[in-house]
Image (spheres, rainbow, N blue to C red):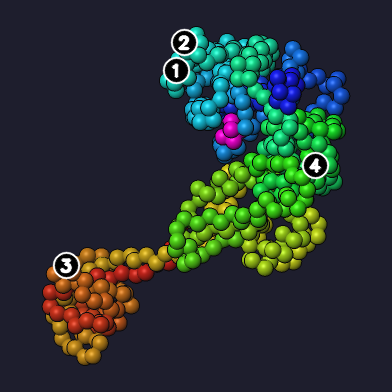
Amino acid sequence: MTKNKDKNIQIRPPVVVVLGHVDHGKSSLLEAIKDFKITSMESGGITQHIGAYEIEEKGRKITFIDTPGHEAFSAMRARGADVADIAILVVAGDEAVMPQTKEAVGHIKKAGIPMIVAINKIDKPTANPEKIKRELAGLDVLVESMAGKIPSIEVSAKTKKGIPELLEMILLLAEMENLTGDISKPGKGLVIESYLDHQRGPVATIILREGILKVGDVVGSSSAMGRVKGLENFQGIAIKKALPAMPAIIIGFESVPSVGEEVKVFDNIDEAEKEIKEKKRIVFQQDGSSQDKKVLNLILKVDVLGSLEAIEQVLKILPQGKVTINVLKADAGDIGESDVKLAMSAKAAIIGFRVKANPVAQKMIDREKIIIIIFDIIYELSQAIRHLLEKKVAPDIVKVNLGSVKILAVFKTEKNRQVIGGKVVSGRVKKGDLVDISRNKEKIGSGKIVQLQKNKKEVDEVLKGAECGILFEGNIAIEEGCFLEAYVEERRKGEL
């Protein structure tokens, strides 16, 4: 890290985020850069996905953030642009500007950071970079060859073509931006990935924005705190301190911090505890009448907290007009005994994403018949939760019209019963049917057909065109000229 005039203000590496449409080669490009600059011969290699890595080009370092590509991870990609200094917009040269391309452009513009367009898959015979540039112009992304100011590089993740030029452009933009970090300030960074390691406990990857982070420091976010017991670089190699813009793995949190939270260094545990806010429960409610709604209690267990954010986005778009989703607990790690006990006490369903239940928890689940659903695909998880919501919805009572009778005569009236005669003018009527009574096309009452006669013989049903005698029971006095509208009430599956 190069020093500025003030010895505490140092030139720091740029943090770069790669955005673009799914399948346009973001991951392939990141892997190609990794392979190009970090060989398997280097000590440590990269043994696991931590959400970021660092390379060195011409003696200068660059940090890359690896953001998920699935559309459900829109919020993570948006935050990726927020933490980054430079964005690379990847567009496949053999395809076109797609929905996530437009979304990525929006995130980059909102973050207000410089952009480089990487036209990928240039090795393909059908690649047409000029077409891509014209389509980008429609999004107000004007590259330099189209009289704009945004640099564009033609690259191939497959052949590594254009990668040196891309890295050179990143360093040029970084120099123009004059990116610095103040190492005299308390360390401060952003969590970009976190999970629970069964051997090491809570683990978080952060990008340090300013200050220095050291082993032994007290750290805290809005939901977790602890003392740094171990610090590693992106390759999993132990380090004593992390500098601005450096991806660092922290071991020592007491619980798993949420992705996107700011992590700060505190002077002591007491100071950290004062600032830590109680972790909020995620409760999805649409209006103030939620007290009258039914509630679906859920416990969410996920592989990493990045997945949790995607699931929360899915839950928010599920209809909750009739049933409210209430997430009692949401964290990373396998399903344990405490999760099952909470599910038992709150009558909650356990939803797992790329996790499993430990043996003790599984025995409790089987014994207590706890609802548990484990998935690998977010769309399937969404469908299952929708099904659980539907089961909570009360069935709809639907009125099915059967037939209409015009009243021709009233023979006898006593208390709440009448003997009347009429003609079936539509459909059919049956003994036991419920009826609405209308006069001059307005409903005036309701009742029931107790008995039916046709040709002075008792029958169960009379069809259109036939006259009949009716023993009516109801709350209204029927007159000649009224209509009886026969119907039945059916219970149908409630809709969300």
Are the residues at dot 2 and dot 1 in contact (C-beta closer than 8 Å)?
A: yes
Closer-to-camera residue (312/28): 312
Percent from the top left, x then y, of residue 301? 69, 51
Percent from the top left, x then y, of residue 105? 51, 26
Measured in 3D between alpha carbons, the distance from the residue under mark 4 to the one under mark 3, in whole angstroms, is 81 Å
Image quarter where the N terminus lies is top right
Q: Is residue 274 left or right of residue 232?
A: left
Q: Earlier in the sequence, mark 4 or mark 3?
A: 4
Q: Which quadrant of the view contains residue 26?
A: top right
Residue at x-position 34% and y-position 66%: 399
Label 1 neighbour load within 10 Å: few <14, some 14-19, many 20+: some
Answer whether residue 168 is magenta in the image.
no
- Where is 167 relative to 418, above or below? above
Disc 2 or disc 4, which is closer to the eye? 4
Q: Earlier in the sequence, mark 2 or mark 1?
A: 1
Circle 3 residue: 441
Give, as a three-letter code, the residue at label 1: Ala
Give, as a three-letter code, the residue at label 2: Met
Residue at x-position 74% and y-position 66%: 367
Label 3 neighbour load within 10 Å: few <14, some 14-19, many 20+: few
Measured in 3D between alpha carbons, the distance from the residue under mark 2 to the one under mark 3, in whole angstroms, is 70 Å
Circle 4 residue: 217
Give, as a three-letter code, the residue at label 4: Asp
Let me know if residue 495 appears in the view. no
Label 4 neighbour load within 10 Å: few <14, some 14-19, many 20+: many
Percent from the top left, x then y, of residue 63? 70, 25
Disc 4 or disc 1, which is closer to the eye? 4
Give, as a three-letter code, the residue at label 3: Lys
Q: Is residue 391 left or right of residue 337?
A: left
Magenta residues, as a range?
A: 78-82
Q: Earlier in the sequence, mark 2 or mark 3?
A: 2
